Image (tube, helix red, strand yellow):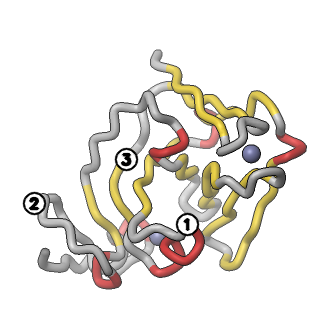
Amino acid sequence: MATHHGECFCGAVKIEVSGDPEGMGYCHCRSCRSWSGGPVNAFSLWKPDAVRVTAGSDQLAMYQKTPVSQRQYCKTCGGHVMTNHPPLGLIDVFAATIPTLDFKPGVHVNYGETVLPIKDGLPKFKDFPKEFGGSGEMASE
Ligand SMILES: [Zn+2]
Ligand SMILES: [Zn+2]
């Protein structure tokens, strides 16, 4: 089983993910942009038992604005580590957090809010797929 190691910007918080992600892609929503300071969030989704904090759990803080997202970051450096999505039963470990992951995006979500159109031919949901509580509507590139 593949294992990937990741850490926050300063290295105080270390995590490990094992196996294969449940899905990978890009989120264009305003919340991701505002929190990350970037135009898109490259996500990889994992079952909670595939994700382990191996060091610095006392440094891992959480900010929750909505019931859907528990955004976890390092108290020391402010670096973003991952976002837990309790209603989905999945954790988004940011692709940038685990550099050895072979990032193969399969989908774009919240493309209706994009500020950085990406013409890569991948399916683009206006918001979320139906199974994730969205409209399931597609958007054009
Ligand atoms: Zn840190
Ligand atoms: Zn988002």
Q: Tell me the SS state at disc 2.
A: loop
Instruction: Give me the residue at 10% from left, 60% from top.
Output: 121
Lateral position of residue 92 relative to residue 133, left or right? right
Q: Nearer the viewer, residue 36 or 126?
A: 36
The span from disc 1 to disc 2 (Cα, nearest Å) is 25 Å
Marks 3,2: beta carbons within 8 A: no
Q: Tell me the SS state at disc 1.
A: helix
Residue assigned mark 3 = 23
Q: Is residue 15 above or below residue 85?
A: above
**Residue at the extreme top:** 1
Label 2 environment density (alpha carbons within 10 Å; few <14, some 14–19, many ≥20): few
Q: Is residue 54 above or below residue 22?
A: above
Residue assigned mark 1 = 36
Q: Tell me the SS state at disc 3.
A: strand
Total marks in image: 3
Q: Nearer the viewer, mark 1 or mark 2?
A: 1
Is the CB–ligand 2 distance for label 1 below 8 Å?
A: no
Q: Nearer the viewer, residue 87 or 25?
A: 25
Question: Label 1 amino acid?
Answer: Ser
The span from disc 3 to disc 2 (Cα, nearest Å) is 17 Å
Instruction: Give me the residue at 28% from left, 49% from top.
Output: 105
Residue assigned mark 2 = 121
Q: Nearer the viewer, mark 3 or mark 1?
A: 1
Question: Label 2 amino acid?
Answer: Gly
Q: Quadrant of residue 15?
A: top right
**Residue 40: x percent and y percent?**
39, 66
Ligand 1 quadrant assignment:
top right
